[in-house]
Image (spheres, grey):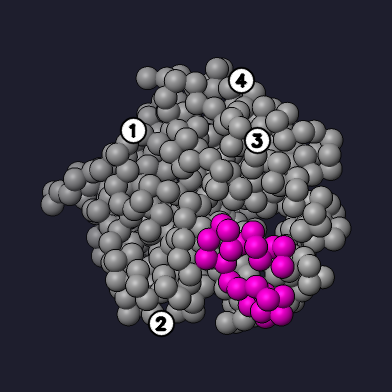
Amino acid sequence: MTQERSGSHGRRSSRTGMSVGVVASAALALAVVVPAAASPTAKVVTASKTPPVPIINANTSMTMTEWNWDTAADSPDSAAILPAVIKGFEKKYPHIKVANTSMSLGEQTDKLPLAFATASSAPTVSQTNEGFGSMGRLVTDKELMSLNAYSNYYHWAQRVGSLPLQINSFTSDGVNFGQGNVYGVPWSGAVVGVFYNKAILAAAGAKPPTSWASFVNDLALVHKAGKTVMSFAGGQPTEYQPEHDLQFLLDHYVSASSLNNWIFHKGANPTINTKPAVQAAQTYVSWAKDGYLSAGYQGTGVTQALNLFDSGKAAFFIEGNWHIGAVQSALGDKAGFWVPPTATGGTGEGWSIPAHSNSPAAAAAWIDWVVSPQVQAMQLKAGNIPVTAVSAKALASVPAMARSATVGWKQDVSSHQLVPFMDWAAPPLLNSIAAGVGELLAGQTSPSAFISSLQSQYSSWAATHYKKK
């Protein structure tokens, strides 16, 4: 779902084993000027000079209805730049008026299938959430248009990269995820990393994390100093933090290739019911038992957890880069953002064209606009991760946390160490992970039983709804 995720996800990316300082300097030129590297399973659409489908022209006059989930609550950074993005599009196409509607992810999930079913209710262009639960359902119901031809014309694969498009791809029957046709083009990347408070670490004799070993050492030092180690939301609404922190641990113990095979249903009987996955769950339990999670986390929502970190009362906050804007505003350079060498993430929601769009040409022009250099520069300045190539000069102009997230995401994409969000693998997982983590940390289930339960739900859903080629 990230998602971009955002202030509670834009959801749904980044990583590196190096420190922020090293990333910003040594890796700068390499990591930022090359679009996301191609995945071996992704479908790259070659460029064409001949319009394969209707293309917008400067004299087109219409009202374009545009839907997104970039609300101030869900995706504050993208929400902040959206008015300027709309204004820029209307300046480029002066006879088109954009009618914007922002809604929550829950509202979108409920509304889109019915609204997209007819021409009278479908918007011109809309964001759609990745994975089987949303985009897969819309593709199955023939409610989305394949973007292959437009991608071919506008060079989106070359500009955005194959992996971001793979995450927004399905076969035409909606059965196979991560292959087939492109149904969405994202305008931002997303990654789960570690926010840290430099002052608290220094007072505890710890240093900013640069590796798993240094991070684990920091946890013990901060706890010994009597400070709150991690700001954590285990209550409602948690949004996605229980899942994000679980995946943060899985990314360390389980290989990226194994996790990606599981999420994309690749190979014979993909599974996470393994000893490394159980070890990740056991570490989660240990964090709770050792007092590393903030007091009262069982009743803490994600906004409260973010506020606790922003107020300088916790050393760490494991969450997505979509919180960088809020953290930067609250703590400035007193905070940092570390992206591990393997990390969970993906892209923000893909922009899609409904099958009943009143103007696919205008919708395609909008998608091309949001991945233009102008809008991608806005994303970077807002603290988001641009999906297209970024110049070293532009990257050097933004705060360290935004640089770290952008460089790390591009490095992890190119090295195939980016792991999509678990709930994209099977719709039942989103709610079951959050509930299961609560039971796990409360001692109501064991690490092995928890992992086994997730695998059981995954396999049960796959047996009914997913067909292997």
**Label 4 sits on residue:** 460
Real-space CA distance between mark 2 and mark 3, rounded to the nearest whole angstrom: 42 Å
Q: Amino acid at mark 1?
A: Gly
Compare marks 3 and 4 and give the one earlier in the sequence. Answer: 3
Locate residue 145, reporting x and y percent: 37, 39
Compare marks 4 and 1 and give the one earlier in the sequence. Answer: 1
Real-space CA distance between mark 1 and mark 3, rounded to the nearest whole angstrom: 33 Å
Question: Do the CB atoms of the residues marked 1 and 3 lie less than 8 Å apart?
Answer: no
Q: Is 448 situated left or right of 405 in this image?
A: right
Q: Nearer the viewer, mark 1 or mark 3?
A: 3
**Label 2 sits on residue:** 397
Real-space CA distance between mark 3 and mark 4, rounded to the nearest whole angstrom: 20 Å
Element type where label 4 sits in the image: helix
Q: Nearer the viewer, mark 2 or mark 1?
A: 2
Magenta stretch, residue numbers: 197-221
**Label 3 sits on residue:** 278
Q: In this view of the protein, which residue sits in the foreground, 129 or 44?
A: 44
Compare marks 4 and 2 and give the one earlier in the sequence. Answer: 2
Give the quadrant of residue 295.
bottom right
Residue found farthest to the left: 49
